[in-house]
């Protein structure tokens, strides 16, 4: 190991790397710091690296490991297909870099394909009618937890992870605002959506998704829970608010990430005029 703490490219066997003074997570993150990518991409890849290393308790890095990790991601319902692809890309980038540096004898991520984004994953936001039905069903269930959960998803556009890690102290009564950090902050009080069974103290992502699917089933919604964030962002853009302001409300890292919402809304507005123009042309043919 060099003075900087970075792994020396000497083709160490993986077990020796794992059991050294630098753990797998730290090593992966140090590798990301050496890769020529944007800071935004590096931050996103770091989430994937941490997810992979926490899942990979054996500390192996062969091709079978990455395939098993991909299968693990495939079964997860708390991540969108796009996020799963980003997680895979982060891990593949690190593995490829370790191979280039000579730490690994082969690029075990080579040939590992990402997840195909189907029409289902490209579905639009939840409709106004579905929103109304959802809140009607939630009120009939008389479950204040569900009402709060869907209010946060719809009216604040929170990510599901952000909901899970909310604490009571995150609410500022004077300004009527929430501190959204998306991770634990070290506060000692309980989580807003707490759980006795989960060691972390908050509701698990699996339980959260089960609750959302339960309500969606009552309403007839086939979209995932992430669609509530989509409708939140879409409504802000459709109101005429500029993208920079929308990004401050939605907490997107850049306005480029909002362009897909803008393009879809702009297309929907222009389509009626398009149909009108060509319906007249068809009538004279």
Image (cartoon, rainbow, N blue to C red):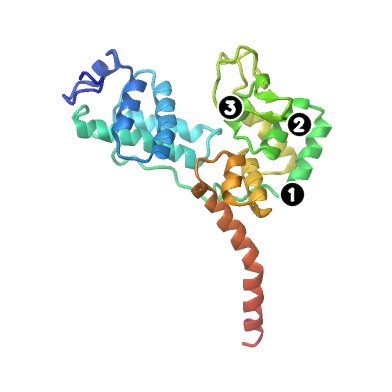
Where's the C terminus, which quadrant? bottom right
SS category of the residue bearing label 3: helix
Q: Secondary structure at mark 1?
A: helix
Q: Is residue 112 left or right of residue 250?
A: left
The reply to whether callout 3 and callout 2 are in contact (CB within 8 Å) is no
In this rendering, the answer to whether 206 lies above or below 215 is above
The percent position of residue 141, horizontal first and vertical second, equals 81, 30
Q: Position of residue 233 (x, y in %)?
A: 62, 46
Is 212 above or below relative to 17?
Answer: below
The quarter of the image holding the N terminus is top left
Task: Name the side, left or right, on which 199 lies relative to 4.
Answer: right
Residue 116 on image: x %, y %: 45, 46
Mark 1 / mark 3, whichever is N-terminal: 1
Tell me if residue 106 can be seen: no
Q: Earlier in the sequence, mark 1 or mark 2?
A: 1
* Disc number placed over residue 196 in the picture, else none: none
Residue wearing tag 2: 147
Q: Which residue is mark 1?
A: 128
Q: Residue at x 66, y 82 (%)?
A: 280
Q: Position of residue 239 (x, y in %)?
A: 69, 53
Identify the residue under disc 3: 205
Gap in angstroms between the C-alphas marked 3 and 2 = 17 Å
The reply to whether residue 115 is in sight is: yes
Depicted 182 relative to depicted 269: above or below: above
Q: Earlier in the sequence, mark 3 or mark 2?
A: 2
Locate residue 145: give its quadrant.
top right
- Mark 3 vs mark 2: give the one in front: 2
> Could you tell me how far apart the alpha carbons at marks 1 and 3 are, in whole angstroms?
26 Å
Relative horizontal placement of residue 70, taking residue 75 as reference (left or right): left
Q: Label 1 crowding class (10 Å Cα cut-off): few <14, some 14-19, many 20+? A: few
């Amino acid at each position: 190991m060099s003075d900087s703490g970075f792994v020396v490219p000497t083709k160490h066997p993986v077990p020796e790397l794992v059991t050294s003074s630098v753990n797998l997570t730290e090593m992966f993150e140090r590798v990301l710091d050496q890769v020529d990518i944007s800071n935004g991409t590096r931050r996103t890849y770091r989430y994937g690296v941490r997810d992979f290393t926490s899942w990979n308790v054996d500390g192996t890095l062969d091709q079978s490991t990455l395939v098993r990790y991909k299968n693990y991601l495939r079964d997860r319902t708390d991540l969108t297909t796009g996020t799963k692809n980003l997680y895979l890309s982060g891990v593949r980038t690190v593995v490829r870099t370790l191979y280039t540096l000579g730490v690994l004898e082969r690029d075990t991520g080579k040939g590992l394909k990402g997840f195909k984004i189907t029409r289902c994953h490209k579905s639009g936001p939840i409709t106004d009618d579905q929103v109304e039905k959802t809140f009607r069903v939630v009120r009939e269930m008389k479950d204040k937890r569900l009402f709060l959960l869907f209010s946060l998803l719809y009216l604040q556009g929170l990510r599901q992870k952000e909901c899970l890690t909310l604490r009571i102290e995150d609410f500022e009564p004077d300004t009527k605002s929430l501190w959204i950090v998306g991770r634990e902050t070290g506060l000692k009080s309980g989580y807003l959506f707490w759980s006795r069974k989960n060691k972390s103290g908050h509701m698990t992502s699996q339980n959260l998704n089960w609750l959302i699917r339960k309500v969606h089933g009552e309403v007839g919604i086939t979209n995932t829970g992430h669609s509530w964030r989509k409708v939140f962002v879409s409504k802000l853009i459709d109101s005429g608010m500029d993208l920079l302001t929308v990004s401050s409300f939605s907490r997107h890292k850049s306005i480029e990430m909002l362009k897909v919402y803008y393009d879809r809304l702009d297309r929907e507005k222009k389509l009626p005029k398009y149909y009108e123009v060509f319906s007249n042309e068809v009538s004279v043919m």
